[in-house]
Amino acid sequence: MPPCTHCQSAFTVQPAEKEFLKGIDMPLPSLCPTCRRQQRFAWRNERKLYHRKCDLTGKQIISVYSPDSPYKVYDQHEWHTDKWDGQEQGRDYNFNRPFFEQFNELMLATPKISVFTSQNVNSDFTNGAQQDKNCYMIFVSDHNEECYYSYGIDSCTSCIECLNCFKSTLLMECIDCSESYNLAFSERSHNCRDSFFLSDCKGCADCFGCFGLRNKEFHIFNEPHSKEDFRQKLKELNTGNLGALDAATSAFRTRAGAQQIHQYYDGNGNENVTGDHIVNCRNCTECYDSGDLEDCGYLIFSFKSKDCWDGHVVVDHCERTYGTISTIGQYNTQFTFVSFYSKNSQYLDHCQYCEDCFACSGLKKKRYCILNKQYSKEEYEKLKAKIVSHMKKSGEWGLPLPPSLSPFGYNETVAQEYFPLTQKEAEKRGWKWKEDTDSQTSAYQGPNSRTPDDIRDVPDDIVQKILTCAKTGKPFKIIPQELALYREHNLPLPRLCFDERHVGRIRRRNPRQLWKRECMKCGKELESSYEPSKPEKIYCEECYLKEVY
């Protein structure tokens, strides 16, 4: 196999992947899995929101597209109406020009949806979110109520500063937790309550600074205490004070880092899988943050799908998809972006309920279209075959959607969180860059204020003040609901802006990458997201279960 055409590293195409690609008549990839992942990430602006006008109605809206974006942007509700028709932009294919150049021009001409939300109530400042109520600044999150500043949460209530948490209430600063109540600063813990600083705990209550425990209560740093003694020591800790909280954080991480045993991956109910944070999957290769998948590979945030490879958010019974981004309920589609419920199509952008379409943008309920132009079945099949043959000769056939066509600047997207680049590095690769991304929030809004170190000293009117991020110097604000939750948890207010807090949580998780290593107990060979050079104690599943149960 030739090396990756982007990073020049050697890579292997898995047998299951080869069989899949043969079945959909696609060539073997020229990019390694990591570079393909990075390029898909560059199409996902998930957390950058802007005030702008709808290009159809002139109404002021919230959008993932900035006011100076070259794309037409319609309010999400207007986009779904019949007030416009993407076929008005239909055009002939020009065999004397590159395919992606023509596809890019079509993308620029057809309207984009302002944000990806549905059935939300009083939750305007969200994206990738549905059926949320009274939520603010939550992203890729569904079925939540009164949740704030979080990412990847589902079916949660009164949670704040969380990442990948599910079916929980009153969580603050938690990562990968589920079915829990009243936790703070906890990771990979489930069915727990009334605890601080947990890591890999299950069924625990009233614990502080504990890791690897099962069905315990009144423990501090994994040591049992009486109920009275536990309450007294917790009171003495005074977690509402910034200095005391920083000391407790340092003590917990030091102890856990030296003593905790980790399973080589986070998941359960799986069979023959590799990846991390996956549940109920079968025969899957390098999938992350996903569940209920079968015979899939290189998927992220994907659920209830089978026979799908190379995707970011592939959900709701997708099948035979490849190289897709933001995909719902599709069958046999390849290289699509924000396209739902379509089938037997390639290279789609913002298309819904389409069938047998090729290189189309902004179409709804259409069939036999190429570059948005309508053809008969016979004309479509003949022209498509001719275009594919031409693309094979030019080397364009089977290439994924390139980041140069992404409607977002690289630094607006998920790619910057996992594969950070400077502006110069991104532009050298021909990828867009969004300058002054925070210009709207950095406008003068009043004098900066100091945040008291103890939550008990925070005045009510701090919600009217402008705070300054201790790391970036950017201004940010505290909303009233946020202040109420910090007081309820008895925790000091944050010193960093939301972007920095989010990135900090991302850095707490392992990268979406696997290394070959051995179980540190029995020597069994493993593929793990724990890098071999890191100090954590990594066990295979069998050895791990002997230690924690």
Image (cartoon, rainbow, N blue to C red):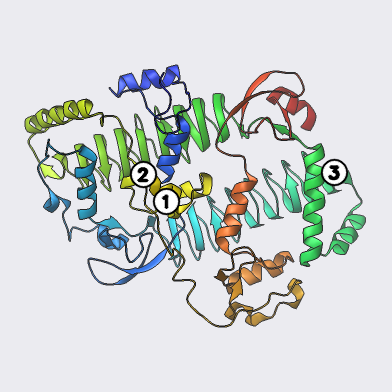
Q: Which mark is residue 410?
A: 1
Looking at numbered disc 2 in the image, what kind of residue is underneath it? Pro
CA gap, disc 1 and disc 3:
44 Å
Q: Of the two numbered discs 2 and 1 on the same chain, state the one appearing first in sequence.
A: 2
Q: Which mark lies nearer to you, 2 or 3?
A: 2
Cβ–Cβ under 8 Å for marks 2 and 1: yes
- Residue at 59% x, 68% y: name it: 473
Mark yes or no: residue 303 visible.
Answer: no
Q: Residues within 10 Å of mark 1 (few under 14, many from 20)?
A: many
Quadrant where the N terminus is found in the figure: top left
Q: Of the two numbered discs 1 and 3 on the same chain, state the one appearing first in sequence.
A: 3
Looking at numbered disc 1 in the image, what kind of residue is underneath it? Tyr
Mark yes or no: residue 42 visible.
Answer: yes
Could you say which quadrant of the image residue 130 lies in?
A: bottom left
Residue 87 at x, y percent in the picture: 13, 50
Q: Residues within 10 Å of mark 2 (few under 14, many from 20)?
A: many
Asked whether, in this view, residue 357 is left or right of residue 52, the answer is left
Q: Which residue is mark 2?
A: 403
Residue 505 at x, y percent in the picture: 62, 51
Element under disc 1 = helix
Up/down of 105 relative to 3, above or below: below
Up/down of 456 relative to 249, above or below: below
Q: How many marks?
A: 3
Residue 523 at x, y percent in the picture: 73, 18
Quadrant where the C terminus is found in the figure: top right
- Residue at 58% x, 30% y: name it: 514
Q: Which residue is mark 3?
A: 222
Element under disc 3 = loop
